[in-house]
Amino acid sequence: MATNLTQYSELFSPTSWHHQSGGPRYLQLQRHLESAIKNGQLPADATLPAERELATMTGLSRVTIRKAISHLVEDGLVIQRRGSGSYIAPKVQRLEHSLSRLTSFTEDMHRRGMTSSSEILESGAYLPSPEEIVSLGLASGEQVVRIKRLRRADGTPMAIETSSLSNEFLPNPGDVVTSLYEVLSAQGIRPSRAIQRISACKLTEEQAAMLEVEPGDAALYIDRTAYLPSGRVIELTIGVYRGDIYDFVAELRNA
Ligand code: 16G
């Protein structure tokens, strides 16, 4: 969206944000811009005037402008692209995922009134890794089925997930079009418990392109091992979830 300097000159004018006893000027400007972004005066995708123009409009030095903007960048409200200036970040609806329920991606999105879809990136039977042999309890010579999917909710890419299962439980990986758990449930198979390890990671170029964000953006790396009631491992899934959208929430109770 093009910058409308006349429209912005009032927004950035010191009379709109500067108060004599209001503390450091970079902070006053930063807070003013934060509320302008939150109330839509500075809408998503609007380009911010160049540093030089902002300095003229606000009467501040370029160093002070840079300081105010860099805090907005850190908070994810403004995006800076080398060569093409700064613009207001698109609004994203954050999703909370409860850590106490063992649900599938499809069920999770459905509960939120969203439609999930899966783009199959890779699917088939392979030679298992030593970890897969041990964790999935594979018999000697047995193949492992792997499905790598780009998971979307209402068309927005959310996560990249790679699931490994014993061939015994999923002889036809091609059956999984949208939901893995649905295909398993149809055979009476349903994990009853899972252990998840969540860590932070940065997206590679390839992952970022698929998730439609920037390379190096923060993401959640989630490793799930799911068990059948018998104690046998049914699934090993590694997921890379967009950090700007997903919150995993754990409820804690007093023991
Ligand atoms: C969730 C699970 C994943 C499981 C998938 C099944 C997490 C972190 N991961 O994404 O382990 O394979 O659901 O979903 O919750 P589906 O039935 O929609 O394919």
Image (cartoon, grey):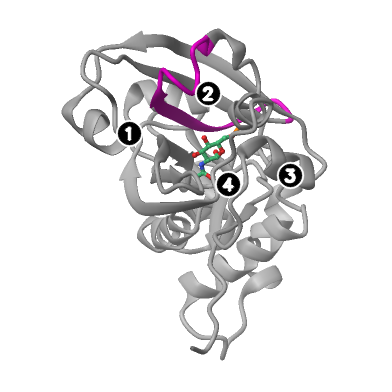
Residue 84: in sight, yes or no?
no
Segment tinted magenta in the rendering: 154-173
- Disc 1 + disc 3, Cβ < 8 Å: no
Q: Tag on residue 150?
A: 2
Mark-to-mark CA distance, 3 and 2: 43 Å
Q: Tag on residue 6?
A: 3
Foreground mark, 1 or 3, reads 1
- Disc 4 + disc 2, Cβ < 8 Å: no
Using the image as rendered, state which of residue 136 and residue 103 is in the foreground: 136
Q: Tag on residue 136?
A: 1
Q: Position of residue 76 (x, y in %)?
A: 51, 52
**Which comes before the other along the chain, label 1 or label 3?**
3
- In what quadrant does ligand 1 lie? top right
Q: Residues within 10 Å of mark 1 (few under 14, many from 20)?
A: many
Mark-to-mark CA distance, 3 and 4: 34 Å
Q: Tag on residue 245?
A: 4
Task: Tell me the element at label 1.
Answer: helix
Could you tell me the amino acid type at mark 4? Ile
